[in-house]
Image (tube, rainbow, N blue to C red):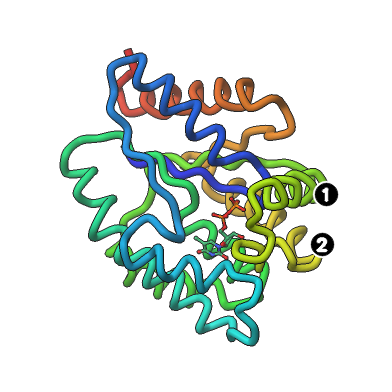
Amino acid sequence: MFITFEGIEGSGKSTVMGLMAEELRLRGFDPVLTREPGGSGLGRSLRSILLDARTHGISGRAELYLFLADRAQHVAEVISPAQEAGQIILCDRYCDSTFAYQGYGRGLDPEQLRRVNDMATGGLMPDLTLLLDLPVPCGLERAGRRNKEAGTTVSEGRFDAESRNFHERVRQGYLAMAAEEPERFAVIDASQTAEDVMLQCLSAVEDSLRRRGRGLE
Ligand code: TYD
């Protein structure tokens, strides 16, 4: 099962993903944890270019193709092999980040984005997307604090430095996509504690499996 975590900066995706992985391991599963950008060897180089606040003047299209190159390699090197091995994949960001950030955020055409994204992924879509939703000021505050503590304000801060309006468009974009595809998306209130968010995510996974006639036990 291919599960993606999406949301604005500071929505707690990586913390919740880690908690969910522990829970799945207790139930005897061996989940693969991965992320975009940076889930493959090539992707780690691309990540440092894409997120570095010192990367100036990159055009919206150049940015798009770097994210897509990261994704194409990630699918080939990590996601497809894990799927073939029957593993549960927990992935921090995937194609909906492109639709939200490059589409709703930067204003690139959504139809074109879908086409080029399909080329990068071979059409591989998540089985379930957990959208961790919270108000933009809360998310930016959390992300700012985290980057300061980790000393990554510059090396990973390019998107955090975007305007409040940009992040509002991204958030509303995610919510619009979730409303269009309610079967694939589960919208989770990410303003609760990480443990509570994880429990809601877990029940969304169970619901999704139940709809396919399977379970987590
Ligand atoms: P990351 O540190 O992984 O996100 P977070 O702050 O949520 O932990 O940073 C990834 C950044 O890249 C994030 O700001 C969203 C952006 N992004 C895109 O703009 N398009 C994409 O396709 C992807 C995968 C990420």
Residue 134 spot, x, y in % from top left:
73, 41
Quadrant where the C terminus is found in the figure = top left
Element carrying mark 1: helix
Which of the pair 131/37 is nearer the observer?
A: 37
Element carrying mark 2: helix
Q: Which residue: 82% across, 62% down?
A: 164
Residue 122 spot, x, y in % from top left:
27, 64
Quadrant where the N terminus is found in the figure = top left
Q: CB at mark 2 closer than 8 A to ligand 1?
A: no
Q: Amino acid at mark 1?
A: Pro
User: Is 198 placed left or right of 22 in the picture?
Assistant: right
Q: Amino acid at mark 2?
A: Arg
Rendering quarter of residue 26: top left
Mark 1–mark 2 CB contact (< 8 Å)? yes
Relative to 62, does residue 106 appear above or below in the rendering?
above
Closer to the chain start, of discs 1 and 2, is: 1
Q: Which residue is mark 2?
A: 164
Q: Which residue is mark 1?
A: 137
Residue 126 spot, x, y in % from top left:
39, 47
Q: Which residue: 53% across, 39% down?
A: 130
The residue carrying pointer 2 sits among few (fewer than 14), some (14 to 19) or many (20 or more) residues within 10 Å by Cα, namely: few
The residue carrying pointer 1 sits among few (fewer than 14), some (14 to 19) or many (20 or more) residues within 10 Å by Cα, namely: few
Q: Quadrant of ligand 1?
A: bottom right
Residue 2 spot, x, y in % from top left:
35, 41
Report, in whole angstroms, how far the alpha carbon at label 1 lies from the one at label 2: 8 Å
Q: Which residue: 69% across, 25% down?
A: 193
| Number of on-image labels | 2
Q: Which residue: 44% across, 78% down?
A: 65
Which of the pair 17/1 is nearer the observer?
A: 17
